[in-house]
Amino acid sequence: MRTAAPNGTKGFGFRLDLHSGVPVYRQIIDQVMGGIAAGALAAGDQLPTVRQVAVDLAINPNTVVRAYRELEIRGAIETQQGTGTFISRRKVKRDDVERQRRLNQLVGEFVSRAGAAGFTVEEYRSNSMSVRSILTKRGDEAMGTDLAALRISNVGKSLFAICLATGGGLAAWIEKPAPLIGMALVGLFFLFAVRVADQWERVVVLRFGKYIGLKGPGLFYMIPIVDTVSRYVDQRVRVTNVSAESTLTRDTVPVNVDAIVFWMVWNAEKSILEVQDYTHAITLSAQTALRESIGRHELHQMVAERELLGHELQRILDEKTTPWGITVQSVEIRDVQIPQELQDAMSREAQAERERRARVILSTAEVEIAEKFGQASLVYEHNPTAMHLRAMNMLYEAIKEKGSMVIVPSSAVETMGLGGMLATASLGGAKVQ
């Protein structure tokens, strides 16, 4: 159990239960809505900031942003730029509170029946399970076709209007309603028979439940009642955002990983006939593959080799989705979040490693310098003239700048024969004693 400290909310704070099977963002939403319903949160109360909640609960900040965004869409909270996030002063409808209570009940029932429903608690914890998918899996919302398949084309509407106008004119001319009724029936036929698919769309047509062909793009027709369309398949490149929260790496480090999957439907026929809901299947498959890949890699590999991890996920997903007529073009690892304590430890480790390298380099340089000095001493030992020349060069380097003063013992002057250099030194403006 993790708890976030309250911030101007009369003792209200977020409590996170990682073993409940409920996604983290959903727990935040439920606690805010429950606090409003119970009176623990009043209009104008300030909620903790995204950063504060993320740090206190040790979760990904994107999860908190997602929860706050959904609460703002519902009208439960409002964000004031530069000030913070507050409970909305607009009154939340009781229907929303009741809907939230019903949702919590469904979630609890789903978690308890996860095995019977065909999903695991880990898959639900992936944040990719929507309320509609839960209801669909339980049979409470059995929809065989997508709602988009029921859309009426503008061409069908125009033909229906023309038929009505023509029937109305004929009925008025002969003063009998028969033409109007007949043309209305014809208009209804055109209204449901004439369909239009956009350039990037394809649609599967079934006749008495049997596949007869793929239609689109452009204008096509179907026989009402006899023919049905399953759904309009978008064949453009689509993006799915997946995340894995508190997943253990191979070296048992909990990380939060966000990834983006780029995919497209290349065979609309297979995507309809081979899988029930390809969008949901892609999301769950990507989530499962991401968690499995995290478990096979160590932390340093995930941080330093994101591109290789993305290629591995792309290969795994593409092998799974190819029979569905879907190809995964690429997977990009967007963010890898690790606990703050581990970040501090890694920072200290990197600093210590750099200091060790600096000391090793300095020691190596000292050894090389000593070796060179040893070689030079052997040369000077058997060649006094070279030693004198070196001493003279050192003296020249010291006195070549104007205003400099070098004190040399007289014995050294006599030994190196530097008496003849005094005149040269005085010309340079230096004083030699």
Image: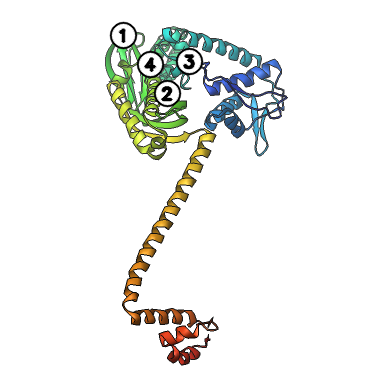
Q: Quadrant of the N terminus?
A: top right
**N-term mark: 2 or 4:** 2
**What is the three-letter code of the residue carrying label 2?**
Asn
Task: Judge by depth and name the residue closer to the eye, 359 or 133.
Answer: 359
- Residue under label 4: 190
Cβ atoms at labels 1 and 2 below 8 Å apart: no
**N-term mark: 3 or 1:** 3
- Residue under label 2: 154
**What is the three-letter code of the residue carrying label 1?**
Gly
**What is the three-letter code of the residue carrying label 3?**
Arg
Instruction: Locate residue 372, reporting x and y percent.
Output: 35, 66
Nearer the viewer's eye, disc 4 or disc 1? 1
- Residue under label 1: 209
Residue 47, quarter of picture: top right
Cα–Cα gap, marks 4 and 1: 21 Å
**N-term mark: 4 or 3:** 3
- Residue under label 3: 132
